[in-house]
Image (tube, rainbow, N blue to C red):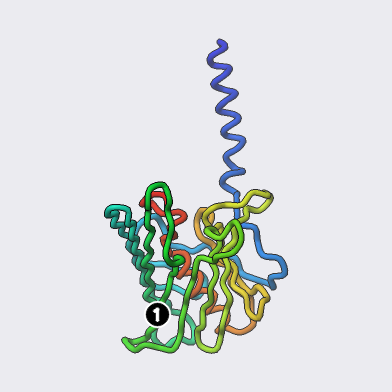
Amino acid sequence: MNALHSIALVLFTSVASCAPAFESARMQPPAGMGPVDTIPVDGIGGGNSGDWRVAEFGGSWRRSETLLDSGGYDRRRSTAAFSLGGPLLETPLDVACRMDALAITVGVVNFRPEPVAWRCLFSTAGRSIPARFELQEARQGLIAQEIRAGEIALDRVILEIRSVHRIAGSSLRTKAPSGYVFSLDSRPVGAVDMTGQPRMMLPAGGDPAVRRAVAAAAMAVILFRDPAQSGLGDW
């Protein structure tokens, strides 16, 4: 074996030995969360439509993303819609989400008049229902542009939503969310890991309405084309 082949073998072995570490990188799970069922979400890929399923829930989904860049005005629009069927639902929930965001550039200064906001409306059998979902860019501290926070109110359940920017086993923060945590009365009851194939952490046992609210919130954030990880360029 000559020197060139030896170097190639060393490089190949090094990359191969690192691959499992990258493949196994996962969101840092929230502390204090109760028992959950961690289940991959089937049917969510890099496309813009399809059918999804996780545990007892499932339905169809679609999404879109557009960018209009005009003389220093960068306007982004994202939409998503999904249905959610499952136990105790006579007809599936239909969820329609939307984000309109504007960034303005003056010289070398770039700013956004309003924080990014992702909002969803709920209906069933063509009728609106009194439920809500909202996720906003938090304006706090030096990492304001990274944090996403909000809530979902579905049936009688209100969950707080907060993005996670940690990878398990690492002290580094990620710019885009590695996942989200869903809390009931400030106690984590579920989560979604968005590193690689999305995985929902659904509350095991307990109130089925809480489990359904976690599933709905998880799908809403999974389908969100967050500007921090958009394919349309940096935000």
Residue 226 lies, with reference to residue 184, above or below; the image says above
The image quadrant of residue 75 is bottom left
Q: Residues within 10 Å of mark 1 (few under 14, many from 20)?
A: some
Total numbered labels: 1
Q: Position of residue 211 (x, y in %)?
A: 56, 78
Task: Write the residue at 54% across / 89% down.
Answer: 156
Residue toward you, 146 or 153 = 146
Taking 3 as reference, is 219 left or right? left
Residue 127 lies, with reference to residue 194, above or below; the image says below
Q: Position of residue 160 (x, y in %)?
A: 58, 76
Residue toward you, 73 or 39 = 73
Q: Report whether residue 199 is seen.
A: yes
Task: Write the residue at 51% across / 69% down.
Answer: 218
Task: Write the residue at 57% across / 81% down.
Answer: 210
Identify which amino acid the numbered label 1 is placed on.
Leu
Pointer 1 residue: 121
Q: Position of residue 55 (x, y in %)?
A: 52, 71
The image quadrant of residue 35 is bottom right
Task: Write the residue at 50% across / 65% down.
Answer: 137
Residue 147 lies, with reference to residue 8, above or below; the image says below
